[in-house]
Image (tube, rainbow, N blue to C red):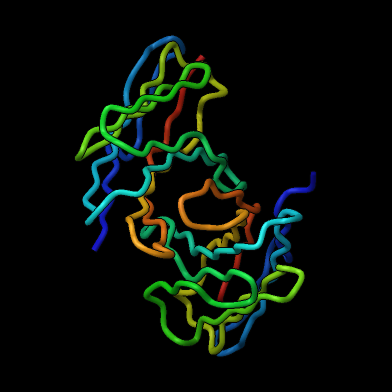
Amino acid sequence: EDQVTQSPEALRLQEGESSSLNCSYTVSGLRGLFWYRQDPGKGPEFLFTLYSAGEEKEKERLKATLTKKESFLHITAPKPEDSATYLCAVQATGANSKLTFGKGITLSVRP
Amino acid sequence: KAGVTQTPRYLIKTRGQQVTLSCSPISGHRSVSWYQQTPGQGLQFLFEYFSETQRNKGNFPGRFSGRQFSNSRSEMNVSTLELGDSALYLCASSLQGAGEKLFFGSGTQLSVL
């Protein structure tokens, strides 16, 4: 069974203090690894998809990387508006495979 | 372009009742997935529909069911509600489903008393 573990559960940063969020996964064969951001009272919003080890993607202050066992979401010089819950999900190969989500990491950035 | 719309936004029911939640996907999207989100378990997959057919199903009891209409709108139903069914129910749509990014609605917050 596919599994996703995210750590830490919560992270508090000072504005400008860079850090990384971890997503460890086990899957029979990886079709894709997804990162989403969720704000309170809203549904998750797509950030990135990574497909193979070594792949990296960037968007503003966020950079996602992927190895065969884990993914990192690096946040450079975060701002208070980056405060949210960050969700990682994997999808295995195979027809119509479902997404398996981790429990998320709640990030709080203090001004 | 309108996003994914879920109704109602909030719902309060009592144990034993049944409930129907509605989801209107983004125009042109044929895949609709449903997820249950709780603080303890996170996001858990319920089922996915594509062109009116259930394409995949998660590990939930048969009390949880769904359907999709010809216009891609979807409903999910929970019968004989239990206290543990209290959760945020999220609907997500995409063009084809597998391997694509999902567009989520804001969810229906269900409270079972």
Q: From the viewer's perspective, is residue B18 above or below residue B102?
A: below
Q: Nearer the viewer, residue B21 or B48?
A: B48
Residue B55 locus on image (x, y percent): 50, 73
Residue B66 locus on image (x, y percent): 59, 79
Position of residue B48 in the picture relative to residue B69 (left or right): left
Quarter-of-image position of residue A108: top left
Q: From the viewer's perspective, is residue A43 above or below residue B86?
A: above
Extreme residue in the right direction: B1
Q: Nearer the viewer, residue B106 or A24?
A: A24
Quarter-of-image position of residue B90: bottom right
* Residue shown at the point (33%, 56%) measured from the top left: A93
Extreme residue in the front direction: A95
- Which quadrant of the figure contains the N terminus of chain B? top right
Quarter-of-image position of residue B25: bottom right
* Residue shown at the point (76%, 69%) measured from the top left: B71
Q: Nearer the viewer, residue B83 or A58?
A: A58
Q: How many marks?
A: 0
* Residue shown at the point (20%, 38%) measured from the top left: A68
